[in-house]
Image: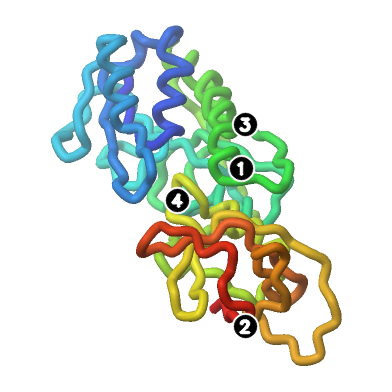
Amino acid sequence: MSTLTLFLMTRKGYQLLADTVDTFRDLFAKVVVGRDATLDDDYAEQTIALCERHGIAWTERSQHREINTDYAMAVGWRWMIDFPEDRLIVFHDSLLPRYRGFNPLVSALINGDDRVGVTALLGASEYDAGPILAQASMEVAYPCTIARAIDDICACYRDAALAVFPQLAQGSPLQGVPQDDNAATYSLWRDEEDYRIDWHGEATRLVRHIDALGSPYAGARTLVNGTLARVGRAQALPDVPIENRTPGKVIRVDNGLPVVVCGRGLLKITELTDIASGESLLPLAKFRSRFA
C-alpha cells in the first residue's frame, strides 16, 4: 500500500476526506490544513475535527516541513508543493485541458458552461499540464450560484478520488494520459478589480457574474451614486429600445428595486448592500441613480 500526505483546503478538501475516509483511512498518513481568511468559511476547523475523529495526524500549513510518504495529494490548494511531480496528485476543478490556471469553476459559471467537472492529474513543471489520472463531470442548470456549484461538484471530487485511491491501496504505480496541449485554455487569477460589475456587458452574463462571485467569495461589487455596494442577487429582464443608451443608469424602479441599463438587456437588482455598513440599500431611495 502507498501512503499519502493530503494538502486540503476549503469545502472541497474537507468533503473529499469526509467522503473517502471510512474506506481509505489506512492510506492517509497525514493531512496538511490550509486556511483562507478571505472566505466566509474555509473549512479548516471542520477538517481538523475530522482528522481527530479518525486518528489522522494533521498540521497547519505554516508548521509543515517535509513530506515523508510515497505520494502527496492537493485539493483546493493554492501554494507550490516541493515534491516529485510523478508522485504529486493534484485535483483541479475543470475538465482539463480547458481552464488551466486559477478559479476555473468561477470562469466556467460566468461563461455559462452547461457542464463542469474535476480532473485528478499528476504534477508538471507547468501548472495544470500534467498527465490526467481521472475525470468526473456534472451538468449545470442556470441560474447557479457558486455555493450551489461547490456543493454539487464535491461529488465529482469524490468520484475522481475513488478512481485513484484503489490504485494507491494496491500499491500500483500511477500512470496518467498526456493532455492535448493544443486544446488547452487558461483561466487568469482574480483580484479585487474582478469583483466589479462592468455594466457594458450583457445582462444574462452579468447575472452569472453576480452568482459566481457570491458566498463564500466576497460578492460582485459596484458603485451606486458613489457608494461601494455588493450586489447579492439580480434578474435579467428583456431589453427595450433606448435612444441614448448609457450602461449603469437606472431606467425605472419596480417596487423599490432598481432596473439598470446594461450594454445589452436590463438588470433588476433584488439584493444590494452597502459594503461599509452592511445595510441594505433597497428600496432604492433615489430614482436618478447611476451604477458604475
At x 40% / y 66%, what residue is drawn? 192
For label 3, the crowd category at 10 Å Cα-Cα, with few meaning under 14, some 14 to 19 and many 20 or more, is: many
Q: Give how far across and how far down residue 101 sits, in percent.
A: 48, 54
Q: Which mark is residue 217?
A: 4
At x 85% / y 82%, what residue is drawn? 241
- Give the mark nearest the N terminus, 3 or 4: 3
In the rendered image, which residue does mark 1 sit on?
95
- Give the mark nearest the N terminus, 4 or 1: 1
Marks 3 and 4 sit apart, C-alpha to C-alpha, by 24 Å
In the rendered image, which residue does mark 3 sit on?
136
- Give the mark nearest the N terminus, 3 or 2: 3
Q: Which mark is residue 168?
A: none
Q: Is residue 291 above or below residue 229?
A: below
In the rendered image, which residue does mark 2 sit on?
288
- Give the mark nearest the N terminus, 2 or 1: 1
Task: Report whether residue 184 is seen.
Answer: no
Task: Report whether residue 243 is seen.
Answer: yes
The residue lying furthest to the right in this view is 241
Q: Is residue 290 above or below residue 36?
A: below
Confirm or deny contact between disc 2 and disc 1 (CB under 8 A).
Answer: no
Which amino acid, by three-letter code, is at mark 1? Leu
